[in-house]
Amino acid sequence: MHEGKVLDRYSVEIKLLPDYPESIPIVREIGDRIPRVADYHMNSCGDACLFLPDERWEAYPPGTNFIDFLKGPLHNFFLSQALVQTGQPWPFGQHGHGANGIRDYYSKLLATEDPIAILKYLGYLSKPRLKGHWDCPCGSGKRLRNCHLKVLNDLRIKIPLQIAHNSWDKLSKSMLQQL
């Protein structure tokens, strides 16, 4: 439903993992209506890619109930699919997959287009502790404590170390392949 109008219907399977609600429900479109390709945010196995793991804190914060999951990320995913099928653009600023999506997400979050700076920020987010005497990843030449320490500390509350590390790993491998 969008603006009081039924746009489309989908057959969906939702699987809750044993560690739910810490984990994100696995969503599969089982009616073969959506192509199983990255451009449609579908994995080849049929799992829907509702959002980047890094943006969970925005899209589906820990502690959010299942009804809010249905009304939020799940609804937005299928609404997007329906709108794109009618020739409209992706309505919620969807990110690409893999390193491109990670780079795009963090460039907006950190207000920088510099892939090296983004990689450095992710490296710091991956560390168990931040140290104020480190160089700031923004490239200002300042120490972290005098520049972006608060930004990084705020993000560390929202983005788990392992998620940041996985994103750092994907982005660094992608950048190495481009060399």
Image (cartoon, rainbow, N blue to C red):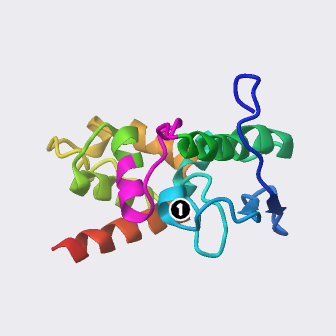
Q: Amino acid at mark 1?
A: Ile
| Element on which disc 1 rests | helix
- Confirm whether residue 128 shows in the render: no
Position of residue 131 relative to residue 86, above or below, is below
Tally of numbered tags: 1
Q: Choose top left, top right, bottom left or bottom right for residue 115.
A: bottom left
- The quarter of the image holding the N terminus is top right
Q: Residue at x 76, y 23 (%)?
A: 4
x and y percent of residue 19 in the render? 81, 65
In front of the other: 175 or 28: 28
Rendering coords of residue 74 (x, y %): 72, 47
Q: Nearer the viewer, residue 106 or 88?
A: 88
Q: Position of residue 91 (x, y in %)?
A: 52, 35
Choose top left, top right, bottom left or bottom right for residue 148: top left
- Residue plotted at (66% across, 40% down): 79
> Which residue lies under the disc numbered 1?
163
Does 5 sit above or below residue 91?
A: above
Q: Is residue 40 visible?
A: yes
Task: Assess disc 1: are there few (<14), some (14-19) or many (≥20) residues with their C-alpha within 10 Å of its C-alpha.
Answer: some
Q: Main secondary structure of the magenta part?
A: loop
The boundaries of the magenta stretch are: 87-104
| Quarter of the figure that contains the C terminus | bottom left
Q: Between residues 89 and 47, which one lies in front from this camera angle? A: 89
Give percent across and percent down for residue 22. Answer: 75, 58
Examine the structure image and report whether residue 94 is included in the region drawn in magenta.
yes
Find the residue positioned furthest to the top: 3
